[in-house]
Image: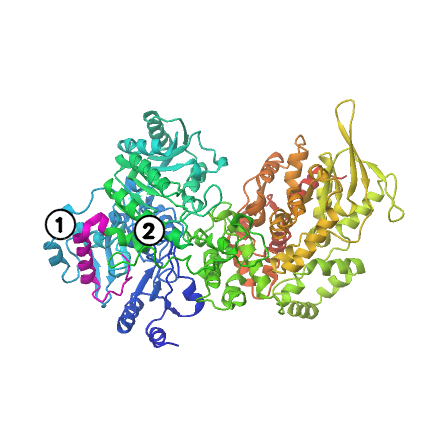
C-alpha cells in the first residue's frame, strides 16, 4: 500500500480504491480522452472532502471531482485522485417550495431532483439529454444547459449559493455581492474592469473559459455564478442552493419539418418571440425511418406550455402557422411526446455511427454562435468538413445557436490525428469569426482549452490563469484543464488500443470483425447508469440492483478497454478484474437495443469467458447448466424423470446436488416433465395420421390442409414446460396452420390450389433422427463457444437445406422460447459468420406471434377481455421486438402494458451460486411489484421459462405463455 493510499484510508470514512478496477472505471468520461488516476475516493461528506484535499496537498497530488462521468471534453478524467460523489454525497437535502429553491449535494442525479420538485409543480430549468444519470455537481462544473435553455437559461442562471472547499482547506459559501470570494479575487477583477467588459462575446450559450464577467459590479459580483463552468479547477463543490421554476401544467410539442438543416437553423431564431420552451433541431441522418416524423430532411422540436392542454396546443399551432415549413405535427399526448424526445436524447450516442456504420467522435460537440447566424455558420461548417474529407451530422439547441456534432475523425493513426488537430484549429477560427463560443454547453476540458487564445486572445487567457492562481495557487485541481492546457491531441483514449485485430470467436459484423472496434462503441454517454428504468427499457438491471459502476454496461466496457490497452489490466483475457465485473452481467441483451450505440455486453461476456477459461477448469455452474440440454436428453432417454424429480424433492439430496452444481442454495430445482413435448406430439400424431411409420426409412404423405410451420423444440419447452408447446400446437392449428416439431421435419411440401382458390399442402416426411437441433443458448451464455459452434454446426447439418433452399422461405421455424429465438436470430450468424447456412436459418426464425401475424393474418383469436400484467422478455425487447405480440394481445382483448426491465433469473444467471440477491433485486424492481399490484382477474403473461420460474419461486405466482392463454380460451379440442 502506498503512503498516499494509507494516509487517505486513515483520514476519510468513505471508500478508498487504489485497485485496478477502481482506477480503470474512471480513466475515461464521454470524451475522446483517457487519463489514468492513482486512486479513487468516494467521500461521505464535506469533512471527507477536506481531508482528501489536505492529504493530496501534502503529497502534491492533483484532485479531480467527478459526477456521472458524462462530460464530453475530458474534464472528468485525471491523473491524481478522483473524487466520486455519486456513491454517498448524492442527497437532496431539502426543498423550499415557497422560495422555489432546493439544497442539493453534488452527486445528486438530476432526475431525482426533478421528481421531488415535480410534487410541488416545480422543476430545475436546465435538463441535458443525460438527465437520467448526470449529477448536479457535474452540471454546475460544466454550466450545463439542455433543451429548455431558451426558456430557463443555463445552470449558472439557476444557482443561488455554493458551498466550496478550496485546495488549501478554506470553506467558502459563494453568492452574489462578492460573497465567499477568496482573498485576492476582488482586487484582480477591479484591476481588469475594462477588459472584462469588452472581452466576452454576448450570446446565450457562451460557456468557454472562466465567467469572470459575472464578477462585474453591474452584474452583481456574483461569485457563485462565476464559479459555474470552472470544470473543477477552482474549488470542490460540496453543496448547492439552486433555483426552481414553475413547471407548465400542460405541454405540446410541435415538430416542424424543413428541407434541410440550414433551413431549419435559419428558421429557429424567428420562433423565439413566441416564447417556446425548446427549439431543438436535428437532421434525417439521426432519425430512424420508423420515427413517424412529418416528411422532411430536418426538423425543429418546438415545445410549448400552458395552464391546460388546449392552451399548450394553441401556442404550438400558432408557431406552426408562423413557421414556413414543409410539413408539421403537433403532439399533446405525454407518451407520444416522450417517444419523440427519446429520439433527440439518444442522438449523442446515435451520432457516433455514420449511416455506413463507420465511427464518429466528439471533440467539437457543442460550439455555439448567435442564433441569427446559425444557418450561415452551418453552411460554412459543412464546407470546412468537406475540405478536410470529414463527415458529421449536426443537431442540438438551434434556438440557442448551439450545435452538437460527432465527426468521423480517424483517431487511430498519426495522419488522422494530425488532421484532427488541423481541423480543430480551423474550426475554432470559424466559430470565432461568427461571434461564437468554442463551448456552448459541455465546457472546454482537454478538447478545446488549448484553443481558448483564438477566442479570447492571450491577454484574457492570461487573466484566466491569474484567477486560477487566486483560487488554486498550488495548481492541484484538475490541472491541464482551462488554463495551461494539455495539447488537444494528447491523451487520446484510442492510442493505447492494439492496432491489429484481436483474435476472437464472434464475427462482430457491425464492427468489421474487430473486437477493439466493438469495445470502442461505448463512448460513455452512460444511459446504462439510469437509476430508474422507465417504459419498456431493460438496460442495465445489474447496475440498478447494485448501484456500482463496475456492474454497469459502461463500467464493463471500460474494463474491457483497459484489458485491451494492457496498461492497468495487464493479464489480458485471464483478468480477474474483468471476470468479476462481467460476473453480474445477466446477458439480458438490453444494451443491444437500449444503448444508443448498441453495445452488446452479452456477446462481449461470452467472448471473454471463452478466452478466460480456455484450457482451464470452469465453474461448476458452467457444466451443470451450460450442458443442460445434454443432461435433460439423458434423463429423457433413460425415462427417469420421475426419479430425478423424486430425488430433487429430498432436501439433503437437493442441497448436495446444488452444491456440486454451483447452484444457489436458495433456489428450487425445476421439475423435469414426465413426457417431453415431442413425445406427446408423436403420440398425438400417431392417432391422426393416415399411414404410420413402421420402420426407419419409410416415408408417408399426410394431407395437412394448412400452411406447415416447424416448431423448434427448445430445451425448455421440450423437457421443462411442454404445456407451452401443446398450447402452441392448439392455437396454430386453430389459426389454420399445421405445426410440425422439427424431428418430424417435412422432406418435401406440395402446394395444391383448389378450384375455390384455397391452398392445401401435402407433406412428405423424412425419417426421424435421434439427433436434435439446438440453438446453443446455454453454451453461449456460459462462454463455451467451441461447444456452441459444434452444436450449431450440427444443427445446420440437420436442418439445411430442407433439402431445397427455397423451402426455407416457405416453412418458418417457430420458436416459443424468446431467448432461444434471439440466439438463433443473432448469435448463430455472428458466431458462425463464415457459414452462409447460419444466416439462412436465422432469417427463417419467427416467434409465436410473428408466425400468426405472417401466415394467418385473417385469423381472429378468441376474446378474453381481461387485463394483463407481467414483463416483456428482455431478449424479446432487445432482439426480436414485441410489435406482433402487442397486436395479438389487442386482438384477443388482453388490455394493459407489460413492464420493462429483466426478471433477474436470466437463464443460468439467477441459478448460479452468489447471484440470488441480485437476481431477486432485479425482479423486485418492476416485475414483482407489477404482479402484486395487478387485479385478481389479470392474466400474468411470461413467455420465457426463466420469467415463469422467477415468478413461481419468488412470488408464488403462475405466469403463462401467451400461447397457453389463447389455447385455454379456445376451449376443449
Task: Looking at this view, name the residue that lies furthest to the front.
Answer: 415
Instruction: Read off the residue under disc 1.
Output: 195
Q: Nearer the viewer, residue 301 or 867?
A: 301
Which of the 4 image quadrants contains residue 469?
bottom left
- Start and end of the magenta stretch? 453-481
* Residue 485 in view in this figure: yes
The spot of residue 442 in percent (x, y) is 32, 50
Query: Please, what secondary structure does the residue beneath circle 1 have?
Result: helix
Describe residue 167's horizontal placement relative to residue 554 as left or right: left
Asked whether 558 or 902 is in front, the reply is: 558
Out of 936 and 953, give the one closest to the viewer: 953
> In the visual, does 951 lie left or right of 758?
left
Our reading of the magenta stretch's main secondary structure is helix
Please rate how many residues cluster around mark 2, counting C-alpha atoms within 10 Å: few if below 14, some from 14 to 19, many from 20. some
- Asked if residue 469 lies in the magenta stretch, the reply is yes
Q: Is residue 356 left or right of residue 460?
A: right
Image quarter of residue 332? top left
Quarter containing the C terminus: top right
Q: Is residue 960 magenta?
A: no
Q: Earlier in the sequence, mark 1 or mark 2?
A: 1
Disc 1 from disc 2: Cα separation? 30 Å
Question: In this rendering, does residue 926 appear at all?
Answer: no
Residue count near mark 1 (Cα–Cα under 10 Å), binned few <14, some 14–19, many ≥20: some
Q: Which residue is mark 2?
A: 421
- The reply to whether callout 1 and callout 2 are in contact (CB within 8 Å) is no
Question: How far across and down, in percent of the image, does residue 372 sit?
Answer: 26, 34
Quadrant housing residue 296: top left
**Residue at horizontal 75%, vertical 26%?**
758
> Residue 478: image x %, image y %?
29, 61
User: Which residue is pictured at 79% across the width and 48% down the height?
Assistant: 680
- Assign a secondary structure to mark 2: helix
Amino acid at each position: 500500500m502506498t503512503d498516499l493510499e494509507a494516509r487517505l484510508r486513515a483520514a476519510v470514512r468513505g471508500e478508498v480504491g487504489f485497485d485496478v478496477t477502481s482506477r480503470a472505471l474512471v480513466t475515461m468520461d464521454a470524451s475522446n480522452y483517457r487519463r489514468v488516476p492513482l486512486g479513487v475516493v468516494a467521500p461521505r461528506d464535506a469533512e471527507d472532502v477536506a481531508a482528501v484535499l489536505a492529504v493530496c496537498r501534502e503529497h502534491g497530488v492533483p484532485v479531480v471531482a467527478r459526477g456521472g462521468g458524462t462530460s464530453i471534453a475530458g474534464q472528468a478524467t485525471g491523473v491524481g485522485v478522483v473524487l466520486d460523489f455519486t456513491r454517498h454525497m448524492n442527497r437532496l437535502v431539502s426543498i423550499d417550495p415557497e422560495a422555489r429553491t432546493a439544497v442539493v449535494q453534488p452527486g445528486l442525479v438530476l432526475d431525482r431532483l426533478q421528481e421531488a420538485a415535480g410534487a410541488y409543480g416545480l422543476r430545475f430549468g436546465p435538463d441535458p439529454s443525460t438527465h437520467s444519470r448526470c449529477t448536479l455537481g457535474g452540471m454546475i462544473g460544466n454550466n450545463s444547459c439542455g433543451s429548455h435553455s431558451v426558456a430557463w437559461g443555463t445552470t449558472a442562471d439557476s444557482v443561488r449559493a455554493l458551498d466550496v472547499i478550496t485546495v488549501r482547506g478554506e470553506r467558502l459559501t459563494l453568492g452574489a455581492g462578492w460573497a465567499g470570494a477568496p482573498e485576492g479575487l476582488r482586487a484582480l477583477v477591479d484591476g481588469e474592469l475594462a477588459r472584462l467588459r469588452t472581452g466576452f462575446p454576448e450570446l446565450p450559450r457562451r460557456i468557454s473559459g472562466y465567467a469572470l464577467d459575472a464578477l462585474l459590479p453591474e452584474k452583481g459580483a456574483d461569485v457563485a455564478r462565476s464559479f459555474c463552468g470552472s470544470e473543477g479547477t477552482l474549488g470542490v463543490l460540496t453543496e448547492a442552493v439552486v433555483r426552481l421554476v414553475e413547471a407548465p401544467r400542460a405541454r405540446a410539442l410541435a415538430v416542424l419539418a424543413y428541407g434541410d438543416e440550414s433551413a431549419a437553423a435559419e428558421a429557429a431564431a424567428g420562433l423565439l418571440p413566441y416564447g417556446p420552451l425548446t427549439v431543438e433541431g436535428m437532421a434525417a441522418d439521426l432519425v430512424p425511418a420508423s420515427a413517424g416524423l412529418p416528411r422532411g430532411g430536418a426538423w425543429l422540436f418546438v415545445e410549448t406550455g400552458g395552464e391546460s392542454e388546449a392552451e399548450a396546443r394553441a401556442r404550438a399551432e400558432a408557431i406552426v402557422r408562423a413557421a414556413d415549413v414543409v410539413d408539421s405535427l403537433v403532439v399533446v399526448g405525454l407518451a407520444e411526446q416522450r417517444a419523440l424526445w427519446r429520439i433527440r436524447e439518444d442522438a449523442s450516442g446515435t451520432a457516433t455511427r455514420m449511416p455506413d456504420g463507420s465511427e464518429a467522435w466528439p471533440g467539437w460537440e457543442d460550439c455555439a454562435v448567435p442564433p441569427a447566424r446559425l444557418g450561415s455558420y452551418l453552411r460554412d461548417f459543412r464546407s470546412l468538413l468537406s475540405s478536410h474529407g470529414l463527415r458529421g451530422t449536426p443537431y442540438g439547441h438551434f434556438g440557442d445557436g448551439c450545435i452538437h456534432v460527432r465527426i468521423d475523425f480517424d483517431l487511430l493513426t498519426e495522419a488522422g490525428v494530425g488532421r484532427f488537430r488541423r481541423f480543430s484549429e480551423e474550426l475554432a477560427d470559424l466559430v470565432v469569426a461568427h461571434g461564437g463560443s468554442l463551448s456552448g454547453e459541455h465546457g472546454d476540458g482537454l478538447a478545446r482549452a488549448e484553443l481558448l487564445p483564438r477566442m479570447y486572445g492571450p491577454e484574457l487567457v492570461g487573466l484566466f490563469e491569474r484567477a486560477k492562481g487566486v483560487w488554486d495557487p498550488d495548481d492541484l485541481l484538475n490541472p491541464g484543464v482551462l488554463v495551461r492546457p494539455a495539447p488537444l491531441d494528447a491523451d487520446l483514449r484510442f492510442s493505447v488500443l492494439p492496432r491489429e485485430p484481436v483474435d476472437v470467436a464472434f464475427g462482430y459484423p457491425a464492427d468489421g470483425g474487430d473486437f477493439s472496434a466493438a469495445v470502442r462503441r461505448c463512448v460513455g454517454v452512460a444511459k446504462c447508469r439510469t437509476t430508474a428504468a422507465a417504459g419498456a427499457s431493460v438496460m442495465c438491471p445489474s447496475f440498478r440492483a447494485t448501484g456500482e459502476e463496475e456492474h454497469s454496461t459502461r463500467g464493463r466496457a471500460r474494463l474491457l478497454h483497459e484489458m485491451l490497452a494492457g496498461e492497468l489490466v495487464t493479464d489480458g483475457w485471464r483478468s480477474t478484474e474483468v471476470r468479476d465485473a462481467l460476473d453480474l452481467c445477466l446477458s439480458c441483451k438490453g444494451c443491444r437495443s437500449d444503448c444508443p450505440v448498441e453495445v452488446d455486453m452479452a456477446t462481449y461476456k461470452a467472448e471473454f469467458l471463452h478466452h478466460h477459461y480456455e484450457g482451464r477448469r470452469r465453474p461448476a455452474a458452467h457444466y451443470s447448466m451450460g450442458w443442460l440440454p445434454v443432461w435433460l436428453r439423458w434423463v429423457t432417454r433413460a425415462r427417469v424423470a420421475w426419479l430425478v424429480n423424486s430425488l430433487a424433492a429430498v432436501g439433503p439430496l437437493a442441497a448436495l446436488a446444488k452444491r456440486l452444481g454451483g447452484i444457489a442454495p436458495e433456489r428450487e430445482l425445476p421439475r423435469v416433465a414426465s413426457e417431453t413435448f415431442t413425445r406427446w406430439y408423436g403420440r398425438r400424431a400417431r392417432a391422426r395420421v393416415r399411414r404410420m411409420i413402421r420402420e426407419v426409412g419409410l416415408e408417408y404423405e399426410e394431407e395437412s390442409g394448412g400452411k406447415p410451420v416447424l416448431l423448434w423444440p427448445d430445451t425448455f419447452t421440450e423437457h421443462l414446460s411442454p404445456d407451452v408447446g401443446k398450447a402452441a400446437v392448439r392455437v396454430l392449428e386453430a389459426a389454420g396452420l399445421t405445426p410440425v416439431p422439427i424431428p418430424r421435419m417435412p422432406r418435401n411440401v406440395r402446394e395444391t390450389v383448389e378450384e375455390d382458390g384455397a391452398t392445401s399442402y401435402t407433406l412428405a416426411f423424412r425419417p426421424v433422427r435421434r439427433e436434435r437441433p439446438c440453438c446453443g443458448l446455454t453454451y453461449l451464455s456460459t462462454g463455451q463457444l467451441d461447444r456452441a459452434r459444434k452444436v450449431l454446426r450440427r444443427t445446420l447439418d440437420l436442418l439445411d437445406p430442407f433439402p431445397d433452399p427455397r423451402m426455407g422461405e416457405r416453412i418458418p421455424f417457430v420458436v416459443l422460447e424468446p431467448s432461444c429465438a434471439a440466439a438463433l436470430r443473432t448469435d448463430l450468424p455472428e458466431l458462425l459468420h463464415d457459414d452462409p447456412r447460419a444466416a439462412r436459418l436465422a432469417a427463417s426464425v419467427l416467434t409465436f406471434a410473428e408466425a400468426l401475424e405472417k401466415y394467418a393474418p385473417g385469423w381472429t383469436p378468441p376474446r378474453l377481455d381481461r387485463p394483463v400484467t407481467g414483463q416483456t422478455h428482455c431478449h424479446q425487447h432487445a432482439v426480436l421486438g414485441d410489435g406482433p405480440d402487442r397486436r395479438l394481445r389487442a386482438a384477443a382483448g388482453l388490455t394493459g402494458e407489460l413492464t420493462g426491465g429483466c426478471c433477474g433469473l436470466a437463464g443460468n444467471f439467477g441459478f448460479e451460486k452468489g447471484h440470488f440477491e441480485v437476481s431477486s433485486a432485479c425482479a423486485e424492481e418492476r416485475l414483482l411489484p407489477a404482479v402484486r399490484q395487478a387485479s385478481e382477474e389479470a392474466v400474468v403473461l411470461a413467455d420465457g421459462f426463466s420469467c415463469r420460474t422467477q415468478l413461481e419461486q419468488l412470488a408464488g405466482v403462475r405466469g403463462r405463455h401467451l400461447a397457453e392463454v389463447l389455447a385455454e380460451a379456445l376451449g376443449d379440442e
